[in-house]
Structures are given as C-alpha cells and as structure tokens.
Image (cartoon, grey):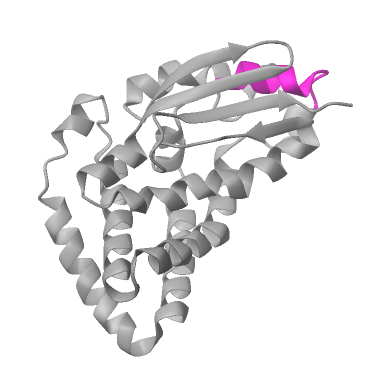
Amino acid sequence: MQVKDLKNYGRSMSEMLMDVPDDLQKQLQRIGRRKVSKELGLLNLIRYVFLHRKEKARMSKLDLSAVREKGMRDEGFISSQIEWAAMFSALSKLRGSEKAIQILNEVIEATTPLAFAHMMPSIEDTKSFDDPFKAFKEYNLAGPEAARRSGCHDIEIVEDTNDALQLDITYCAWHEIARQLGVEEACLPNCYSDDVLLPDYLEPLGIVFKRTNTLARGGSRCDFRFERAKA
C-alpha cells in the first residue's frame, strides 16, 4: 500500500464530513437529540425545539456570501453549520452559553468518534508503513491545497522535518460561519473534538499532538503540531 491509497487521501475535512453515509448521519443526529433531551428535561425540551426552529430560520436568512466567496460551495455543509449554530443559540438562551458548550461537548464526545472512524485511515493501515510518522506526514501534507480549494481551511505549513509537522490553520469555515452567524462560541465544541480524538488516534502511531490556541478561542490561528514520540 502507498500513502495515496489511504482512505480520503488528498481531500478536505468538509468533503470527508459530507460523505458520511446518510444512515450514520441519522444515527449521529439521534444520539445528539438524546443527549440534549436528557439534559433539558421535558418542559425545557419543548422550549428548546421552538427556539431552535426560530434561530435556524433567522440564521438561514443571514448573509454568508463571504464564506461562499472563499470557495465553500457545499450548501449541505453550510446548512449543517447553521443547524449546529442554532442548537448552540437555543441552548444558550435556555441555559447560558457555558452550559450550552458543556452540553455540545458531550454531544461531540458521543458522536464524533463514529464519524471520525468513517472519515480517517485506520490506525492499522497507517501502522503498516515502515515509518508511520512519515506516512502520517505525507498524508496530511496532501490536505492544505484540497482544504483551500474547497473553502474549508487556509493552512500554512510551518514546519516539516523528520520529527515534526506543524500545520497552522489561519481560516476555518466552521469558525467563520459561527462568527458570521453571531455565535462564535458555537465553534468551541468543534475545537474540543480534536482534543477528544487526536491523542488516542495518534498515540499508537508514536505521534504526539500539541496545540496552544485556536481561532475560536481568540487566537490568530489554530496551531496543530505533531511530533514523533521520543523513544
């Protein structure tokens, strides 16, 4: 096997996400609804449904032309981010933004591993290479151009050495859509998904993940750094 044969080589994250099968998408939505329902209780759930619909309708009318001008042409992706932002807004109105982030973090913990497993190469496939870190680097270096082309991310290659790879995201469609919709904090659970997934995925490959900031947390970039684990 060559690196280019790994699952979803050379594709952007938004493209991978929107290719998750419908049955899995529906499963993830059901899990998310159950998490929200359990947290809110019956009375607040009724209020949440009303607020969510109201916020989704309002946000759907807002101008996202700047996102489309960056190259994001996938209306399904944009709609999914409006849905997420409306969830956050409705939860915030009921329970406050801090609690809304906590609830959506729990949704992320329950759903993202299932989507991630469908989107990314398996640990076993990457471990099959003589040098898994080198294979991981080659795989991820194919991503920046696809990300730019799809309007998903702008990515700068800051370091590319035998023992380290640093990719800084200076533009993120997830963050920008949330910001344009007036609920920038709605992106924080998306950032949290990296903290949930990447350490466990990378540790068996002998790779250490580090990040000091993200756009959603007020940084100028999301600094994704991957280092070869020391023996």
Front residue of 7 and 100: 100
- The residue sitting at 74% across, 30% down in the picture is 207
Where does residue 124 sit, x and y in percent of width and height? 77, 35
Q: In this view, does 207 lie to the left or right of 110?
A: right
- The residue sitting at 79% across, 31% down in the picture is 206
Query: From which residue to which does the magenta span run?
Result: 128-140
Q: Is residue 228 left or right of residue 145?
A: right
Q: Main secondary structure of the magenta part?
A: helix
Where does residue 177 sit, x and y in percent of width and height? 27, 42
- The residue sitting at 35% across, 41% down in the picture is 174
Q: Is residue 1 at all visible to an observer of this figure?
A: no
Give the answer, above or below, for where 142 lies relative to 20.
Answer: above
- The residue sitting at 31% across, 42% down in the picture is 77
Among all residues in the image, which is located at the extreme right? 231
Where does residue 55 sit, x and y in percent of width and height? 19, 63
Give the answer, above or below, for where 41 lies relative to 127.
Answer: below
Image-quadrant location for residue 42: bottom left
